[in-house]
Image: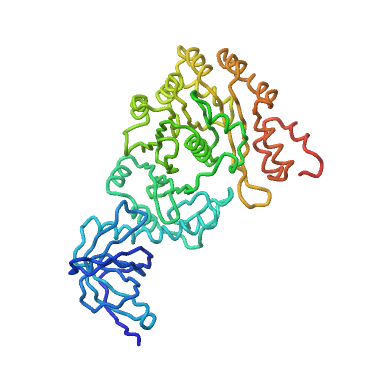
Amino acid sequence: MKEKFIEKRRYSRIPVTLTIKYCKEDELEPIYKDAISNDISEGGILIQTKESLPVGTPLKLYITSVRLTSPIQISGKVVRVEEVEEGKLYNLGIAFTAIEQKHTDFIKKYIQTVDLDKILNFAVQKRASDIHLVANQPPIMRLYGELIPVHDRALNAEEVKGLIYGFLTERQKEKFEKDLELDTSYINDMGRFRVNVHQEKGQLGAAFRYISTEIKSISELGLPKVVEDLARKPNGLIVVTGPTGSGKSTTLAAMIEQINRERKCMIISLEDPIEYLYQSKKAIIRQREIGFDSHSFIEALKHTLRQDVDVILIGEIRDLDSISIALTAAETGHLVLTTLHTTDAISTVNRIVDVFPSSQQQQIRMQLAETLRGIIAQLLLPRKDKQGLVVANEILVQTPAVANIIRQGNTEQLRTIIQTSTQLGMQTMDSSLLKLITDGAIAYETALPYVKDPTILAKIPKGSV
């Protein structure tokens, strides 16, 4: 017979499944039993277990979550018992009697983020790449390049602020309120998200980029085989370029993971924020987050050179100082992998040189000619069948001819070198787009805005468009 209770609750409860271990608090040799939670509040938890306990039984609880580095330990007592399945399954309502303030704060924050998790998890299940929270609009997800509302209901400014501030630490809130910009990360049961918090017309907004827990291989990403060869270089500079959302971080992760599998070395990544999480295999991997583990890219780069490192991953080279140190690191025998927001090989070389004063540019050309190992420019484009995205690449590989052109500053000649060096794995973006069209992977109209030489489209066989 089921016994039902009605109680007035001081705290709002939210449904959530957490892993619980519990034992009777007065046991000399405690025997821990497993349970799962049905819901939780700041003042208590409802768990489902195979045993019934008398009301008033004091318990010791250990609550586990992916957001915790170690379980929360809480004391409580049974205040409610409900038989779910006769003699087999019971719901126990437990009121907390002793809990540290930091654990109360964690539970409060967890409750605040449940609605956020619903939005993010729905978008991830739909295979969206990005989710945007904007005041007075519904949550928006980017699905295969298109912006689509997650649901119809618009969120007001207070709701958006509550969702964002619900997962930020006090330190992060203070930093945002000071700088009005914040790059951070967020973790839930679905995985990791790279987050940018910003302000727009005086109201908070946020952009979430989903970072898959799975690091795909270079071949699984559809990248050319020459990218594997570049990842095996012992030293030098490799730059992955492309607009925001073109998969640069994913390509870098695949290259780092290949090095991790194949080479005994020390890898240090400098990221803002950390995106993919690596497990050391043959390599030892140390990941440092700018703003948390170091104050700036510049300081982190300077000191990384003194940490017995072989491979350095720099999330982005942004300015003269970071580019200068990256070139020095590559010149002194390290393999440096990084990104730039440029569109092709020529603009990448020009950007690296032009950031320096004219009096230094010849010296930088010399450094770049000696250290550059390759440039991987890429775009992510929606598939013709609307079933995902496909990557298009321009690849430049260092050769004596490439180095000579960079030294002389005749960067426009690089296009001819790329076009005539396909046997070395080089390819132009136009030739990559042409192949994707003729293979039926993307539509003609999708490629058209990115083609630099319109005559290339004349090579498309009839019936392929």
Most extreme residue toward the bottom is 1
| Residue 34 located left or right of residue 213 | left
Q: Is residue 228 left or right of residue 315?
A: right
The residue drawn where x is 51% and y is 59% is 150
Q: Is residue 222 depicted above or below 299 in this figure? A: below
Q: Quadrant of the N terminus?
A: bottom left
Looking at the image, which residue is at 78% across and 34% down? Answer: 458
Residue at figure coordinates x 50%, y 56% from the top left: 123
- The image quarter containing residue 98 is bottom left
Q: Depth check: 320 or 281 in front?
A: 281
Examine the image and state in which quarter residue 166 appears: bottom left
Residue 246 rendering spot, x and y as whole percentages: 55, 40
Q: Quadrant of residue 182?
A: top left
Residue closest to the eye, 162 or 122: 122
Q: Seen in the image, is 178 located left or right of residue 29?
A: right
Image label count: 0
The percent coordinates of residue 313 (x first, y second) are 44, 32
Q: Nearer the viewer, residue 176 or 361?
A: 361
The image shows residue 16, relative to residue 374, as above or below, that is below
Q: 454 or 441: which is nearer to us?
A: 441
**Which quadrant holds the C terminus?**
top right
Residue 244 in the image: x percent, y percent? Answer: 52, 39
* Residue 325 sits above or below residue 243 on the image: above
What residue is shown at x 66% (from left), y 21% (from top)? 417
Could you tell me residue 413's position as x and y percent?
Answer: 64, 19
Most extreme residue toward the front, as rendered?
29
